[in-house]
């Protein structure tokens, strides 16, 4: 009887432990930070575009008014000079929502700026109430243009810039998103460089015409310089750090360095062999539209 009593206690104890474990697992699986079905609106698809449309003009990693950037999920979690703007699970206690609905000062966005709609604020509330879950993987929205899609009134592709080779009878002619290399003597196309990100504002051949330097980007998003191998028809290097479209990209006389500049008021010097930034020149109070090195470098 004693052994039977011990077995019953052991059996009862095991059942109690298993029930506790099941309850614990159910609690964890149903927690908003861990359950996909309760994660609310998707950050990348639904939440980040709202920040980008209404907030990122003033609250980004460079122009972080109130020491607050809403450009990436990591920066959102960091908060600003007044601390955290999110209280996961409690949208009514989140500073972000309070300033958007006018419960806290200063109300955001400022009066002369477009404000999120009630539907968009509701999306933010749902996201916070579900735990303010961030993106999985790498955030890509910063390089995505969030604007209405307007069909062009014409199928024509205007020329945006043009340059002539130094030693060969070539012309490089830029259109939106592509460069056409022409034979200057008969105007026949040699080939096209496609899939460039946006408007091309700058073209320059290297001294021996082996390379073409292309300055492009997407307005309001980023600038990119592409170094193209003429003979092999391939990209040698890409140089990207500007926060707006490039207006100029040029070779140093020794062609070991290039300089880029654009709407973000910066000039950046790059090492051609490594593709790495050498130096950023700041201090301009407006866009930089053109660049030239002195002949001696």
Image (cartoon, rainbow, N blue to C red):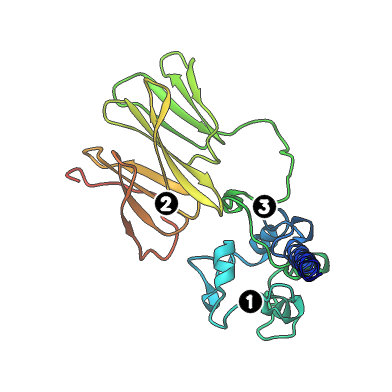
Quick one: 139 or 152, which is closer to the camera?
A: 139
Q: Secondary structure at mark 3?
A: loop
Mark 2, secondary structure of its residue: loop
Q: Measuring from the top left, give residue 297's x and y in whole percent.
A: 20, 46
The residue positioned 30% from the left and 26% from the top of the image is: 166
**Residue 246 horizontal side relative to residue 103, left or right:** left
Which of 275/88 is in front? 88
Figure check: 232 above or below 57: above
Residue 123 shows in the view: no
| Viewport quadrant of the N terminus | bottom right
Mark 1, residue position = 85
Name the residue nearer the viewer: 23 or 281.
23
Q: Who's the residue at 76% across and 59% down the image?
A: 41
Please report whichever mark, 2 or 3, sits nearer to the chain's N-terminal start: 3
Q: CA distance from mark 2 to mark 1?
A: 38 Å
Disc nearest the viewer among 3 and 1? 1
Residue under label 3: 146
The x, y position of residue 243, in whole percent, is 49, 55
In the image, farthest residue toward the left: 296
Q: CA distance from mark 2 to mark 3?
A: 25 Å
Residue occupying the point 46% across, 44% down = 224
């Amino acid at each position: 009887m004693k052994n039977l009593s011990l077995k019953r206690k052991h059996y009862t104890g095991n059942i109690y432990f298993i029930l506790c474990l099941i309850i614990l697992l159910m609690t964890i699986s149903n927690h908003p930070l861990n359950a996909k079905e309760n994660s609310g609106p998707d950050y990348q698809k639904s939440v980040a575009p709202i920040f980008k449309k209404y907030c990122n003009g003033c609250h980004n990693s460079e122009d972080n008014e109130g020491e607050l950037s809403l450009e990436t999920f990591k920066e959102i979690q960091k908060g600003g000079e007044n601390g955290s703007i999110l209280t996961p699970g409690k949208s009514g206690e989140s500073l972000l929502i309070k300033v958007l609905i006018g419960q806290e000062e200063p109300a955001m966005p400022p009066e002369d700026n477009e404000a999120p709609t009630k539907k968009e604020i509701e999306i933010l509330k749902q996201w916070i109430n579900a735990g303010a879950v961030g993106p999985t993987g790498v955030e890509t929205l910063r390089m995505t243009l969030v604007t209405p899609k307007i069909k062009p009134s014409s199928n024509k592709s205007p020329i945006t810039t043009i340059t002539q080779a130094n030693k060969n009878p070539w012309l490089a002619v830029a259109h939106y998103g592509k460069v056409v290399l022409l034979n200057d003597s008969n105007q026949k196309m040699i080939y096209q460089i496609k899939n460039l990100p946006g408007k091309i504002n700058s073209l320059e051949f290297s001294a021996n015409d082996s390379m073409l330097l292309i300055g492009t980007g997407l307005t309001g998003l980023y600038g990119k310089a592409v170094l193209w191998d003429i003979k092999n028809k391939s990209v040698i290097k890409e140089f990207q750090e500007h926060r707006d479209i490039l207006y100029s990209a040029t070779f140093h006389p020794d062609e070991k360095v290039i300089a880029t500049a654009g709407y973000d008021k910066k000039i950046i010097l790059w090492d051609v062999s490594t593709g790495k930034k050498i130096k950023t020149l700041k201090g301009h109070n407006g866009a930089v539209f053109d660049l030239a090195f002195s002949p001696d470098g």
